[in-house]
Image: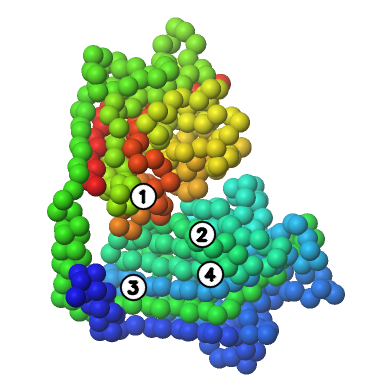
Amino acid sequence: MSVVSMIFIFFLFLLNNVNSLSIKFRRFHPQLDGISFQGDAYSSNGVLQLTKNQLDAPIGGSVGRASYDEAVHFWDAKTGEVTDFITEFSFVVKALNNSSLFGDGFSFFFAPIDSKIPKNSSGGFLGLFSPEYAFEPSKNEIVAVEFDTYSNAWDPIFPHIGVNLNSIRSLGYVQLESDFKKGSVGHALISYNSDSKFFTVSVTYDNIPNFTSEISYIIDLRKFLPEWVRIGFSGATGKQLHVATSMAIFNSKMFHLIQTQNSSMSVLLMIFIFFFLSLNNVKSESLSFEFSTFQPNSNSIIFQGDAFTSNGVLQLTKNQLDSPIDHSVGRASYKERIHLWSSKTGKLADFTTKFSFTVKSVNSSVLLGDGFAFFIAPFESYIPHNSTGGLLGLFSPETALDISKNNIVAVEFDTYSNAWDPVLPHVGVDVNSINSIGYVEVAARHINKGFTAKASISYYSTIKLLEVLVTVPDQKPPYSVTYKLAYVIDLRFLPEWVRIGFSGATGQLVETNNISSWSFRSSL
């Protein structure tokens, strides 16, 4: 018996030895027990209809919820333990009257058991938030995964899947792929691991074979939700466009909640997994380097554009106060190529890079621009023409939003909101486009004070997870804040051998972007 089979069988055995709650609906009938309806939601032809869909009556401004009618014990106030869970459902979002416009979407949500549809929450509020408190996390108590088909002022410019924590503005998102006009079927899986605190969303589509949209976010759900919660779906259409979308949920393995009680089995599973990973890494190709400071005569760093070293740090853009420093762009990268994956075995490398950095305004300005990024690109990569400002020295203006024209992955530390950006400074994951596929917003006070922050970027090849942690000093207890972002991605679309480094740029607004230390470790 192989090690993989042992882990699989043991894992199944472990699931059979825990207390669990399982809810499953293969079809939804009008007289079905177990579902509570609010607003315009109802069941018809075996599916949940979240909004009105009558073609002979007004259906704009419709809002509805369908939720499980029992309270779900989400975490234990006595022990602090949080449950693991998995929920799966299939859905259709379909335009009516063959319209090419859509509005507004639906969500899967967790909320207090007594939660009701807020007033005036149709349209972009998705039946989740009132207009008065939609952007005030302190006024809400809800976690949702939104499937948003219309771009409101707070949304990205395309339909998207987003993770919402006490606000209608998504903390992270990924583009929603599908042909809505034809009413194609999507299949969603949402899961939470209480140990790692990974909240993961995965969506596949019947009309796009071999394609999966995935987003992961690190979150402690105890900080956002009560001990007992309501789970379900919420959907809404808008009023102003007079365009509506029919939203149906069907074939739902709605919730599977796992509460582990046998801690010895949990430890044993960890030992088996560790043993399996150790076997895979007996013969490994490893690389590591560390720079605690940067010297001008170092031959380990390659500079492009305006980047240089000064006073022991990497300066990515110009910083002379007596000369123009706007529209500056520079890169600093490791001189040797990095083996990211093996074309012979298909195996991906695990890696972790850590660095400390300072973003500082010039002449005490409160406005900053534009930011910097850690990037992974083909080894022969160079700064594109006209890539200053919001393009961060990564993309040309002509192809910045065309994923078919680029071959790069970057973690951007973006201080200025361009047309494709969220409205606040953010840390984002860029994949072949300057438009981040996932991001976390950063408070302005954490980037415009010239504080030294610490970043850690890790890739776990087994689960194909890219994890970003950024810790910044804060003037309030506990005197530091950590921003977290995770995204599931297979990096084998990049070349086998890559260049890694930093890229920074200024536009009409300026700042200095300095890297004061850098380490990197990889194992293949």
Q: Secondary structure at mark 3?
A: loop
Foreground label between 2 and 4: 2
Mark 1 or 3: in front is 1
- Side (left or right) of 289 relative to 165: left
Q: Is residue 127 above or below residue 341?
A: below
Which residue matches tag 4?
187
Label 1 vs label 3: CA separation?
A: 24 Å
Q: Nearer the viewer, residue 38 or 397?
A: 397
Along the viewing direction, whichever of 442 and 277 lies nearer the viewer: 277
Which amino acid, mark 1? Leu
Q: Residues within 10 Å of mark 1 (few under 14, many from 20)?
A: many
Residue at image coords 64%, 58%: 149
What residue is rendered at 62% in x and 92% in y?
A: 31
Task: Describe the element under mark 2 as helix, strand or loop.
Answer: strand
200 vs 59, left or right, is left
Pointer 4 and pointer 1: residues touching (CB < 8 Å)?
no
**Do the CB atoms of the residues marked 3 and 4 lie less than 8 Å apart?**
no
Identified by mark 2, the residue type is Phe
Where does label 2 land, which residue?
Answer: 211
Q: Which residue is mark 3?
A: 83
Residue 423: image location, x then y, percent: 56, 41
Label 1 sits on a secondary structure element that is: strand
